[in-house]
Image (cartoon, helix red, strand yellow):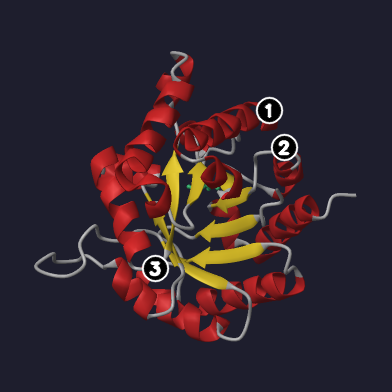
Amino acid sequence: MMRRPLVAGNWKLNGSRAQTTDLVAASMRLADQHDEIECVVCPPNVYLQQAVDQATGSRLEVGAQDASDHEAGAFTGEVSAGMLGDVGCSYVIVGHSERRERHAEDDVLVAAKFAATVRAGLAPILCIGESLADRDDGRAADVVAGQLRAVVDMVGATGFGAGVVAYEPVWAIGTGRSADADAAQEIHALIRRVLAETDHALAERTRIVYGGSVKVGNAAELFSRPDIDGALVGGASLDAEQFTAIGRAAGARAHPE
Ligand code: PGA
C-alpha cells in the first residue's frame, strides 16, 4: 500500500506575524507543487487563524501543537480540539516529548487528548519516543510500544481515526543527532506491528513519520526506508528552503524511480 507521505513543521515557540506570512507562503508553494505529499505547518496558537486564512485555496494544511483533553469549561489557558477545528485546523500534535517532560503529560492524558482530537474531527499526530537512558538500557522498543499501546488500547481502531504516529527519539530532538535510518526503520516497523495487533488495515494505512533533527542532509535517506512515511520537522521547519527541500525528498518517496 502506498501511503501519502506527510511532512509537518512543528514551529514550537517560534514565529511572528511576519514570519508566519513568509513560512506559510513558502509552504503553500511546496504543497501546491507536490500533491503527492501532504504538507502541514503547526504554528503557535495565536498565529493559527492567520495561517489558515492565508492557506485557504491551497493544499497546505494547518495544525496546532497541542489541544486540551476537554471540550469546554473552567480550564483556564486551554484550547479545545473543537476550537482548533472551528478556525480551520486539520491536525493536532499530541504528546510531544517537550510537553510530556515540561508539562508532566503522561500516557493517560496523551491518550485523552488523542481521543478528544479525533472526536472533534481532526487528525492527531501522536509523538512517541524513548529517552537516551531508555535506549542505553536497551528499552527503546518497550518504551515506544508502551506509549503507543496506551493510546490504541484506549481508543481502538475506529477511535484512531486518521491519526498519524511520529517516532521522535527524545535524544534526537533539537540535538543535531538524528537516529540513523536503519535504527529508525526498526522502530517504525515495530510501531506498525503494534498497530497490527489491533487492526491490520489500521497498521497498513497509518502514516508513521520520523522526527528528531531531520535536515536536508538526512531526509532522503530516512524516507528511503519502507516504514518511514514522512517527517515531523522542528528546527529545519523555520527555514523555508530547508523545509521545502525536506518536502521534496518526501515527494521522491511517493514516486520512486
Ligand atoms: P527537531 O524537532 O527537528 O528540531 O529535532 C523535532 C520535533 O521536536 O518535532
Alpha carbon of mark 3 to alpha carbon of mark 1: how far? 34 Å
**Label 2: element kind:** loop
Q: Determine which residue is flagged by label 1.
A: 182
Q: Nearer the viewer, residue 24 or 253?
A: 253
Instruction: Please give the count of numbered marks on the rendered protein.
Output: 3
Q: Determine which residue is flagged by label 2.
A: 225
Give the amino acid at mark 1. Asp
Image coordinates of residue 147 in percent, x first then y, are: 37, 34
Residue beneath the point at 68% across and 32% down: 181
Q: Nearer the viewer, residue 247 or 71?
A: 71
Badge 3 density bin: few <14, some 14–19, many ≥20, Cα 10 Å = some
Question: Where, by quadrant of the figure, is residue 30 drawn?
Answer: bottom right
Badge 2 density bin: few <14, some 14–19, many ≥20, Cα 10 Å = some
Question: Where, by quadrant of the figure, is residue 200 drawn?
Answer: top right
Residue beneath the point at 50% across and 71% down: 62
Residue 121 disc label: 3
Would residue 16 appear left or right of 177 to someone viewing this image? left
Q: Is mark 2 within 8 Å of ligand 1?
A: no
Image coordinates of residue 102 in percent, x first then y, are: 28, 44
Please say if the residues under marks 2 and 3 sit with CB atoms less than 8 Å apart: no
For residue 253, above or below residue 97: below
Q: Is mark 1 within 8 Å of ligand 1?
A: no
Please say if the residues under marks 2 and 1 sit with CB atoms less than 8 Å apart: yes
Question: Where, by quadrant of the figure, is residue 98 drawn?
Answer: top left
Residue 114 disc label: none
